[in-house]
C-alpha cells in the first residue's frame, strides 16, 4: 500500500522550503527517520502527527487523504492509547483518541476507549472541577456506546465504567442504576461494583454483606470449575486427584472444618477421588475416600439451615440461593450403585467395601 502520509509530508516540506534537518530538529527525530517516512519505508509515530500538522498548518486528515492508512487502523490507535495510559500519559492518549474520532466520529470502540481513558485520568485530576468535567464528558461517550453498540460485552463494560464514574461524582442512585444493568454473566463484576458503591456511600454494613456474598460465590465457583476435572484429566488420574483434593481443602479452609453447606461438595469430590483411586488400583485409598464421602454426606444431611459460619454471618438463604432439597447420602448411594457393576466392581470382593455400602444403604432415610 502506498504510504500517503510520507508523500504528503514530503510535499508540505518542499512547499514550505523546510530541509529534512530542520524538520527533524523541530520534531526531535533523526534525519534518517524523516527520509524513511518520505520514501515510504516507515511511518511516523502517530503521536507526532498532530505536531506535524501544526507545523505545516494543515489538519491531520490531509495526511491520510481522508482514509486512515492500514497501519493506523483502530487497533493501532487503541493499543497506543493503552500504552500511554499505562505510563500515566493520559492527556496524550486522550488527544490521540479525540483526533481519531474526528476522522471516525461514529466508531464505537474508539468512543469506549476514549471514555475509559478519561475515567482513569479522572483518578488523578489536577482539580475537582477538572475531574468533574472529564467524568461528565466520559459519561456522554459511554451513553453513546450503550445506545449504538451491538456488542453485549462492550455494553456491559460501558455500564460498569458508567457506574464507577457516577460513584466518583457521588451520584449514587445513577451509579446503582448503571451497575444493575450489567448482564447476569457479569455478576462478579456487578457485585464488586456494588461493594465499591456501598463503601463510597458510607454504608459499611451493606458493603460487608456484599463482600461476604462475593467471597461465598467465589468459593462456589470452585465447585463449578471442578466439574470438568474428570474430563480434562481422563488420562492423568493422579493430576485429577490432586485438583479434587485442592478443591476439598479449599472448602474445608473456608468452613474452618465446621459442618456447613460446603459439605455437600466435599462429599461429592471425595467420591470422585475414590473413583480415580479405584481406576489406578489404589484400593485402600479408594475405600478411605468413600468413607470420607459418606462422613461429609451425613454432616450435610444433618444441617437444618445455613450454618452460622462467622465469615458469612450476614447472609441468609436468599442471599446464597441455598435450598436444601435433597438427601446427600441418597445421592451418594445412587452414584455408587450406578458404578457397582462397572468402575467399583473390582472392590466388590473387599469386606470393607461391602460393609460401607451396606451401612450407607441401610441409613438412607
Image (cartoon, rainbow, N blue to C red):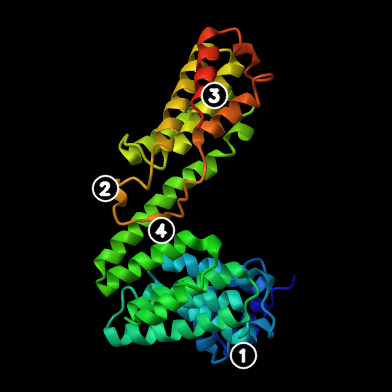
Secondary structure of the residue carrying numbered label 4: helix
Mark identifier at residue 319:
4
The picture places residue 116, in percent across and down from the top left corner, at 46, 73
Chain-order first, disc 3 or disc 4: 4
Residue drawn where x is 56% and y is 79% of the image: 146
- Which numbered disc, 2 or 1, marks the residue closer to the eye? 2
Give the image quarter of residue 316: bottom left
Mark identifier at residue 15:
1
Q: Residues within 10 Å of mark 3 (few under 14, many from 20)?
A: some
The picture places residue 308, in percent across and down from the top left corner, at 30, 47
Q: Distance between the residues labelled 2 and 4?
A: 15 Å
Secondary structure of the residue carrying numbered label 2: helix
The picture places residue 201, in percent across and down from the top left corner, at 28, 74
Quarter containing the N terminus: bottom right
Chain-order first, disc 2 or disc 4: 2
Tell me if residue 262 comes above or below residue 32 in the rendering.
above
Chain-order first, disc 1 or disc 4: 1
Give left or right: position of 64 versus 117: right
**Closer to the camera in the image, 129 or 364:** 364
Q: How far apart are marks 2 and 1 (CA)?
A: 78 Å
Residue under pointer 2: 310
Residue under pointer 3: 361
Give the image quarter of residue 335: top right
**Marks 1,4: beta carbons within 8 A:** no
Amino acid at each position: 500500500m502506498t504510504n500517503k502520509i510520507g508523500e504528503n509530508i514530503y510535499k508540505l516540506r518542499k512547499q514550505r522550503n523546510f530541509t529534512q534537518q530542520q524538520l527533524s530538529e523541530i520534531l526531535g527525530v533523526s534525519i534518517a527517520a524523516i527520509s524513511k517516512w518520505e520514501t515510504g519505508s516507515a511511518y511516523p509515530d502517530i503521536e507526532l502527527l498532530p505536531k506535524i500538522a501544526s507545523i505545516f498548518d494543515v489538519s491531520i486528515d490531509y495526511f491520510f487523504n481522508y482514509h486512515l492508512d492500514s497501519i493506523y487502523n483502530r487497533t493501532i490507535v487503541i493499543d497506543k492509547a493503552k500504552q500511554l495510559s499505562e505510563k500515566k500519559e493520559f492527556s496524550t492518549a486522550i488527544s490521540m483518541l479525540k483526533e481519531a474520532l474526528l476522522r471516525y466520529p461514529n466508531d464505537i470502540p474508539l468512543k469506549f476507549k476514549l471514555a475509559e481513558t478519561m475515567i482513569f485520568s479522572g483518578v488523578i485530576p489536577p482539580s475537582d472541577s477538572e475531574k468533574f468535567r472529564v467524568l461528565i464528558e466520559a459519561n456522554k461517550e459511554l451513553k453513546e456506546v450503550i445506545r449504538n453498540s451491538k456488542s453485549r460485552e462492550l455494553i456491559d463494560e460501558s455500564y460498569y465504567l458508567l457506574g464507577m464514574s457516577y460513584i466518583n461524582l457521588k451520584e449514587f442512585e445513577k451509579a446503582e442504576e448503571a451497575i444493575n444493568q450489567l448482564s447476569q454473566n457479569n455478576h462478579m463484576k456487578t457485585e464488586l461494583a456494588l461493594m465499591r458503591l456501598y463503601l463510597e456511600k458510607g454504608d459499611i454494613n451493606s458493603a460487608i454483606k456484599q463482600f461476604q456474598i462475593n467471597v461465598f460465590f467465589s468459593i462456589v465457583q470452585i465447585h463449578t470449575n471442578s466439574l470438568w476435572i474428570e474430563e480434562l484429566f481422563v488420562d492423568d488420574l493422579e493430576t485429577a486427584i490432586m485438583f479434587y483434593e485442592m478443591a476439598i481443602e479449599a472448602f474445608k479452609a473456608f468452613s474452618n472444618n465446621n459442618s456447613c453447606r460446603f459439605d455437600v461438595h466435599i462429599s461429592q469430590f471425595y467420591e470422585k477421588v475414590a473413583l480415580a483411586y479405584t481406576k489406578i488400583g489404589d484400593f485402600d485409598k479408594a475405600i478411605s475416600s468413600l468413607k470420607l464421602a459418606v462422613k461429609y454426606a451425613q454432616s450435610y444431611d444433618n444441617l437444618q439451615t445455613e450454618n452460622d459460619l462467622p465469615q458469612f454471618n450476614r447472609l441468609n438463604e436468599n442471599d446464597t440461593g441455598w435450598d436444601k432439597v435433597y438427601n446427600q447420602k441418597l445421592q451418594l448411594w445412587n452414584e455408587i450403585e450406578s458404578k457397582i457393576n462397572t468402575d467399583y466392581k473390582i472392590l466388590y470382593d473387599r469386606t470393607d467395601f461391602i460393609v460401607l455400602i451396606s451401612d450407607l444403604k441401610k441409613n438412607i432415610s
